[in-house]
Image: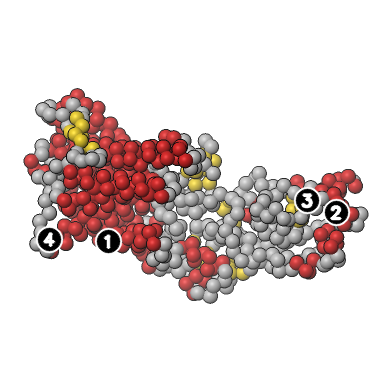
Amino acid sequence: MAEEQKSSKSSRKECYNCWRLIPEDSKFCPFCGFDQIEKAGFKLISEQKEGSVTQGQTYSQTVTTPQYTNTAYSSASHNYTQYGMAGSMSPAYTGNYPRQTVPRRFGWVDIARFIGAFGAFIYLIALVIEIAAVYLYTEYIPLMASFPQPFPFYFVIPPFPTVLINGVYSTGYYVAYPLIAVIATLCFVYMLTVSRNFKREISFSYRGKAGSTLFLIGGLFMAYIFLSYAIVLIAAAFGQSLPAPDFGAIPNYMLIFELIFAPVWEETIYRMMIIGIPILIYAALTHSGDGRKWWKYLLGGNMKITKPVIVMMLISASIFGVAHWAADSGWGLWKIFPAAVAGLILAYLFVRKGLWASILFHFSVDAAGIITSPANNNALLNSTMDGFLFIWIVVGAIFFVYWLMVLYGFVTGIKTLPPSVTSRYAAAATGSSNSENTQSTAGTDEKPPTLSPSYAHFDAGTGTAVAPQTYQHPSGIQSPQAQQEGHNLTQYSGRIPTTPSELAFGYVCSNCGGLEAKYENGKFICVYCGHESDK
């Protein structure tokens, strides 16, 4: 019995922050969440302190923690009963991470999000129509194959002039066209699989900081459509006519092929070769990589926006913009600016989401020309696309202003946007008296906050934040540390933190902030947005 008690005592240590007994191999205190590795100055309860507790005396701890509902995370592996630690422990440490139900008022941010989601839904419908049109126009493949000249691919590289690369010959059309259609379809399907939050966004029930991938791509698409039409309208207001290619002089079948082939070809050149490969080489030479496989640099996605990445994004966008003017395709000098903006958007999608996202965005812009091209003589379909364009321009104005503010804030470091959704969690957790943050209204947030629930929780009756009860040591019993130093535990009262802090452990999705994930094939997959990560 004495040996067991000796072993039990020697396998524990005191938390450097709250002075409670915790397992010796703990990385974080199960009561206050304090990082034990960061602070190397904490004192261990070793065999030298074994005489601190009177033989036969039981040292137990009873910790009162807030009561929560709706468990959001659980793990059978996080069970510390083997250490003989009685009493309730921190839910975040034992694996029962609670989901806080935060009352929140319905506001203009929700309305703006719904308008954006509605526009993205129209974008989704248009994508379905565009992909269907690509398959319907396969009847033009024999005409494409009979085209007398090889199709020219334009690739602009300094120094100018443009380099002309002979491309697909007649027999290649039978392979290239179906392959492009399949690639566009796969990109579309993949977007749907990673955009499971979209149905919540369009139903006013999403409260996360980051939106779905469909919301992101659709929003950028509408912002670009607004910019393109705004340039044309501004030029018309000053009596200027902007030169454009004579699409009527191009055979319908060749126009269709050009519009659907450009997304795959140009994204491979301007994004994979100008951004992916240089960043891969830079990471290899400077040993600054994040451990990703080499092919992940080529396909993009989940890349940190560092200075080298920003430089390559700007170079890619600049070359992309100049190429649309220098290729002698009929566009005037004015086309450089909107094309460069499109190149910057495509570069951003490549870096953050992957090559598939930039291909899909590029396809959605170019394929819209298929529906409105002379090859389409369906009046109903043309009217439908005109209605879609009107919606995109109106909603795109909102997205355009939003992304301008985001870009300005990124460049200057000045916050220009209103407080985010997560800041409302922070205000509520600190007991803010702001009625917008604490007043109970219809509808609640389902998104887990980024603050540890060990420090504050909501009283459903009053709708206010309540701090947990301060730890009280059992009367008549002193901690071993207090006995050794001749002090009473009351000396350390108030050392238990009651202010919020960021999570020091657990899974947090880098895309949406979700705290739930499933583990498959060596990757964590967020159950909210489907984002995959290695850690």
Residue 109 x/y as whole percent? 39, 65
Q: Residues within 10 Å of mark 2 (few under 14, many from 20)?
A: some
- Residue 293 as seen in the image, left or right of residue 144: right
Residue 466 x/y as whole percent? 62, 69
Q: Residues within 10 Å of mark 3 (few under 14, many from 20)?
A: some
Q: State which mark lies toward you, 3 or 1.
A: 3
**What amino acid is found at the position of numbered circle 3 in the picture?**
Arg
Image quadrant occupied by the C terminus: top right
Mark closer to the chain start, 4 or 1: 4
Res. 253 in view: yes
Q: Nearer the viewer, residue 498 or 130?
A: 498
Would you identify the image quadrant in which residue 299 lies? Answer: top left
Residue 236 circle label: 4
Would you identify the image quadrant in which residue 175 lies? Answer: top left
Residue 378 x/y as whole percent? 14, 45
Residue 236 x/y as whole percent? 12, 60
Q: Secondary structure at mark 4?
A: helix
Which residue is under mark 1?
A: 397
The residue depicted at 61 percent of the width and 49 percent of the height is: 74
**For the residues marked 2 and 4, what is the alpha-carbon distance in whole angstroms?**
86 Å
- Residue 115 as seen in the image, left or right of residue 85: left
Q: Residues within 10 Å of mark 4 (few under 14, many from 20)?
A: few
Q: Residues within 10 Å of mark 1 (few under 14, many from 20)?
A: some
Which residue is under mark 2?
A: 49
Q: Secondary structure at mark 2?
A: helix
The residue depicted at 59 percent of the width and 64 percent of the height is: 500
Q: Are marks 1 and 2 in contact (CB under 8 Å)?
A: no
